[in-house]
């Protein structure tokens, strides 16, 4: 679940803040790493405890936003320079729409790789069976 919360934050940073120019783009359930020292300044609630279903619904909304931007993008849109709003947040430097989308897709891919990297090894392990007490 924490990975999904982090991906919400990544989408809020790179799509909502940069590409869409929303000054306060962050959902309170977003989750940053240790690099995020003052999450409350961004509108993030580090004490939030949403259910898995709530987080998955939010993730679905954010993924839909990314799909819509990609589906509607033209070459000239991808070259547009995005200037971050003056409000607290990340990133703080200009990026093109294409660069922002690359960050989002890379985050998605890297987290997917992390999530499935050991599945094959785990599936090949012999299953432990409960021993009966004599």
Image (tube, rainbow, N blue to C red):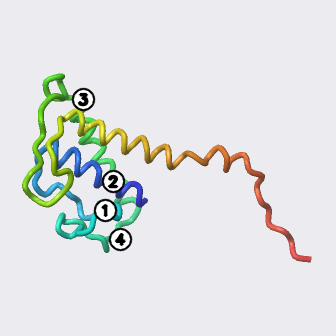
Foreground of the two, 66 or 89: 89
- Dividing the image into 4 quarters, which one contains the C terminus? bottom right
Q: Earlier in the sequence, mark 1 or mark 3?
A: 1
**CB contact under 8 Å: marks 4 and 3:** no
Q: Which residue is mark 1?
A: 35
Q: Which residue is mark 4?
A: 49
Indicate which disc residue 97 carries.
none
Alpha carbon distance from label 4 to label 2: 14 Å
Q: Earlier in the sequence, mark 3 or mark 2?
A: 2
Q: Residues within 10 Å of mark 4 (few under 14, many from 20)?
A: few
Q: Is residue 91 left or right of residue 122?
A: left
Alpha carbon distance from label 1 to label 2: 26 Å
Give the residue drawn at x 67%, y 50%: 122
Badge 1 marks a residue whose secondary structure is loop
Indicate which disc residue 71 carries.
3
Alpha carbon distance from label 1 to label 3: 32 Å
Q: Nearer the viewer, mark 4 or mark 1?
A: 1
Give the residue drawn at x 80%, y 66%: 130
């Amino acid at each position: 679940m924490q990975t999904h919360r982090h991906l919400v934050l990544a989408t809020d940073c790179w799509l909502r803040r940069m590409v869409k120019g929303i000054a306060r783009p962050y959902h309170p359930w977003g989750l940053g790493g240790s690099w995020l020292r003052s999450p409350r300044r961004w509108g993030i609630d580090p004490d939030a405890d949403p259910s898995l279903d709530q987080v998955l619904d939010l993730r679905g909304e954010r993924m839909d936003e990314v799909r819509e931007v990609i589906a509607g993008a033209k070459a000239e849109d991808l070259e547009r320079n995005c200037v971050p709003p003056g409000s607290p947040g990340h990133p703080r430097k200009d990026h093109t729409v294409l660069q922002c989308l690359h960050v989002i897709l890379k985050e998605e891919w890297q987290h997917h790789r992390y999530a499935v990297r050991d599945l094959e090894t785990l599936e090949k392990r012999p299953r432990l069976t409960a021993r009966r007490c004599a």
